Amino acid sequence: MVECGNEREARYRALVEGIVEEWAAGKPPNPRAADPNAKPSGYWRLTGWLTNYLLRHDEFPRGVHPMPEGRDSEGRLEPSFPVDFDRLLGERPFPASR
């Protein structure tokens, strides 16, 4: 059975959520966020970038990739930051299509 685009995107979003939560573990919440459950700075940029990467390539990224600069909820610039996907993902197998 071939996945349609929405099923594929939903599957990748669930996968990305788990990976980004691993990346965020132990990082302090964004100090500018008023919400006590705020995510670390860069959380949403990494989530979007990784989702787009998987949708484009159907494989995990390898090596170090810079996340783009971003803006916080008040429009302040947040700098780019590197993510080492070899370290983050380890030997995790890419899930097979359904």
Image (cartoon, rainbow, N blue to C red):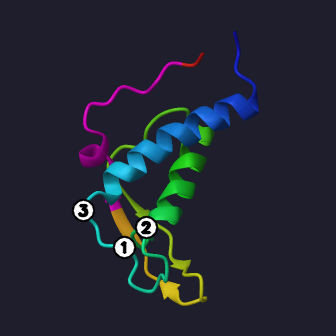
Where's residue 31, x and y in %?
38, 84
Residue at position x 50%, y 76% in the image: 69
- Which residue matches tag 2? 39
Assign a secondary structure to mark 3: loop
Q: Are marks 3 and 2 in contact (CB under 8 Å)?
A: no
**Quick one: 23 or 93, which is closer to the camera?**
23
Among numbered discs 2 and 1, the one appearing first in the sequence: 1
Q: Which quadrant of the structure image shows residue 93?
A: top left
Q: Is residue 84 visible?
A: no
Q: Specify the quadrant that holds the N terminus.
A: top right
Among numbered discs 3 and 2, the one appearing first in the sequence: 3
Q: Check disc 3: other Cα within 10 Å, few if <14, some if 14-19, many if 20+.
A: few
Give the amino acid type for the residue marked by disc 2 in the picture. Lys
Residue at position x 74%, y 34% in the image: 6
Q: Left of 98 or right of it: where is 46?
A: left
Give the amino acid type for the residue marked by disc 3 in the picture. Gly
The relative height of residue 83 versus residue 81 in the rendered view (above or below) is above
Q: Left of 26 or right of it: where is 30?
A: right
Residue at position x 57%, y 42% in the image: 13
- Which residue matches tag 3? 26
Looking at the image, which residue sits at the far top? 1
The relative height of residue 6 versus residue 35 in the rendered view (above or below) is above
Give the amino acid type for the residue marked by disc 1 in the picture. Pro
Q: Are marks 2 and 1 in contact (CB under 8 Å)?
A: yes
- Which residue matches tag 1? 29
Residue segment shown in magenta: 83-96
Assign a secondary structure to mark 2: loop
